[in-house]
Image (spheres, helix red, strand yellow):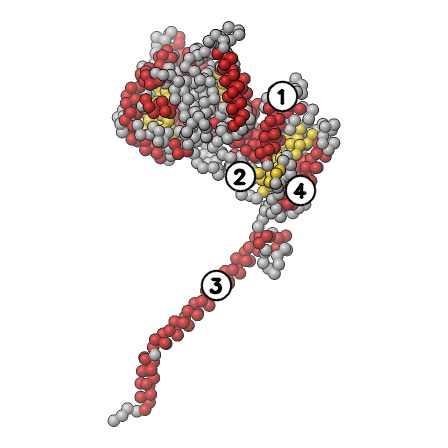
Amino acid sequence: MDPPFDVWNLSSSLLSLWINRFYIYLGIAFGISLWICFQVAIKKQLFIFKAKNSQEKSVPKATQDLTTNGYLSLQKKQIFVSGVKIFYGSQTGTAKGFAAILGKAVSSLDLPVEVINLKDFDPDDHLIEEISSQNICAFLVATYTDGRPPESAEWFCRWLEDAASDFRFGRNYLKGVRYAVFGLGNSAYQSHFNKVGKRVDKWLWMLGARRVLARGEGDCDVVRSKHGSIEADFMAWKAKFIARLQVLRKGEDKSCGGHCKRGKCDSRLQDSEEQEQEQEPEPEPGPACRDGPWPADTQEEEACESSGEEELGPGDHPSLNAVVDVEDLGKIMNHVKKEKREKDRQEEKTGLSRNPGESDGGEGRAMITPALREALTKQGYQLIGSHSGVKLCRWTKSMLRGRGGCYKHTFYGIESHRCMETTPSLACANKCVFCWRHHTNPVGTEWRWKMDQPEMILKEAIENHQNMIKQFKGVPGVQAARLEEGMKVKHCALSLVGEPIMYPEINRFLQLLHHCKISSFLVTNAQFPEEIRNLKPVTQLYVSVDASTKDSLKKIDRPLFKDFWQRFLDSLKALAAKRQRTVYRLTLVKSWNVDELQAYAELVSLGNPDFIEVKGVTYCGESSASSLTMANVPWHEEVIRFVRELVDLIPDYEIACEHEHSNCLLIAHKKFKIDGEWWTWIDYNRFQELIQEYEDSGGSRSFCAENYMARTPHWALFGASERGFDPKDTRHQRKSRSKNIAGC
């Protein structure tokens, strides 16, 4: 019997669906796809709407009023000037008043403005913040007595000068900062007229900042004032500044006015002219005015490898005369350097025409030539007599501000803020590839110069050091207690420059230091073995071991002696005979001397030092006298790896301490590890007692290194979380746009 019709109808429908199932699936998939696309479109529109509302809330009302149909134009979205910061340094209040007037004028443009007293501004912490702030920085600075800045601006000017000539900052450190300078002065004092304003302008430019307006100069002398008074001078400059500000707000970037070519600001031309003007002799304004720069020109330019505690620091600005320092080296006015060298050659010829070692007066000629004296003075040295100098280490500055001490503080307990860095001899017998002076200093294999008395050298060294410490009174962050302590010198690092042991009266100089209760840290380059043998006890005696083979030593140190290798070995043997603390200083130069581990181990057995300092070389900038580059600077981890491998070859030694910031580690003899604790620090009071007994006995009552050792604190040990930083201080990480340089 046939099935009912409705059954056939249902079966036909199902069969039809089954046959056409592919098209059904396709339709369903298409529908789902449309639904998903619709949901995505809705969510995207919602996201844009929310983002637009958020952006509108963040835009100032003044800008919102300029919108059209609710959408900001591209031009209005971009802010070219976000505000103006006005910095002033004033002694009598004039600059302060001008700053207030300028602030009101800027406010009238509906721009945020901030007026800042330079006394309350720490450039080390905050100046770099202006790189990305889109602010315009205006500096109103007065020139005070003898070309000095006012007290409120002394620290700012000193820091700026240091940074401008410190290679670690680089020429792009303040790239992105836009600035203008107005100086206040009195042209009656021609030799110092607006000197501070000129220098601030120049130093900012040297650090990569961009001048947006030619420097203005206000003159208190109504007769010589360009506009009849200093107030009129300022108002004229202010009008230009406001006009320039309006141009910058629109995003236009035309010339700043004055010394410009083809629409671009040629700042270098202005700086070159200023440098030439500074070199020209100027009439003295009177007996109250001194020659040369203000005392704050005595910046430090921490030597790269001449001294560990210095770590290379600022010298003077790279002016036309700055030819002898690493920080200014190389890239500024090369033709002037050639002229200087030619001048020195002429002086050398003049000296050689006389009898050797004699001058017109029958005594040796001065070690420091006039050209060298001029350059060193500009770079912050306080020169003493004819062959000595003293300088302020940057670690001294750091510890005065509670920002940590040098590696000698970590390794040996030196109080960095009480350490005087000096030398009785600026001359050297080597021309090392990492020399931070790039070989423009005097050189020689024997003393052939006029000799100053050690009493005079020490007296003036302490006085000059104290004067430099005094300049930090009122500097932001300087601790009053440490400033007071810093006036009492407790340590002397005879490692500033040159070869101190060449000085014929070095033993008398050391005696004078000890009589003043000042500890002595003397560094020698291992070319004077006889002088090492004859040297009286020092707190700690260093020998620089820059290489471990004859060929590599010749390549790195480039010594003047023909028998340099034998002298080197004899110096290490002489060191082994010393009973007081002795140190090898190893400077690692990647690709030059880091693969000589076995040879280094043999040298250690020859001199048997108490300690071995291993430090990565510090790159000191380009020089025609050296092929050293950044590629030769080892990373801190590479130094650690070298030290570990070296210790494996010298079983009597272990790694004791680390100072990460200096890229330096200390290897100590196991005799300084007592009951599992390291005693690398120095008991300075005990040393003074022992050296006094030695002197009183005529040298018969000797003593050894173990007699004045002290326990090393935990934070100074290798492996500690502090990595050599004293927890009593506050670590300060300098913000830097330049590439990191190991060992600095």
Alpha carbons under labels 4 and 2: distance apart? 23 Å
Tell me the residue that label 3 is attached to: 43
Q: Nearer the viewer, mark 3 or mark 2?
A: 2
Q: Residue at x 64, y 55 (%)?
A: 65
Note whether residue 443 is visible: yes
**How many numbered callouts?**
4
Q: Nearer the viewer, mark 4 or mark 1?
A: 1
Q: Nearer the viewer, mark 1 or mark 3?
A: 1
Q: Position of residue 734 (x, y in %)?
A: 48, 35
Residue nearer the viewer, 89 or 528: 528
Indicate which disc, 4 or 2, sits on the residue closer to the N terminus: 2
* Label ID, residue 281: 1
Q: Callout 1: few (<14), some (14-19), or many (20+) C-alpha neighbours within 10 Å?
A: few
Kindly identify the amino acid type of the residue bearing the numbered disc 3.
Lys
Q: Secondary structure at mark 2?
A: loop
Indicate which disc, 4 or 1, sits on the residue closer to the N terminus: 4
Q: Answer with left or right where residue 530 lies relative to residue 357.
A: left
Q: Are marks 4 and 2 in contact (CB under 8 Å)?
A: no
Alpha carbons under labels 1 and 2: distance apart? 34 Å
Q: Residue at x 51, y 20 (%)?
A: 342
Kindly identify the amino acid type of the residue bearing the numbered disc 2.
Lys
Tell me the residue that label 2 is attached to: 175
Indicate which disc, 1 or 3, sits on the residue closer to the N terminus: 3
Q: Secondary structure at mark 4?
A: helix
Alpha carbons under labels 3 and 4: distance apart? 47 Å
* Label ID, residue 242: 4
> Residue 274's image quarter?
top right
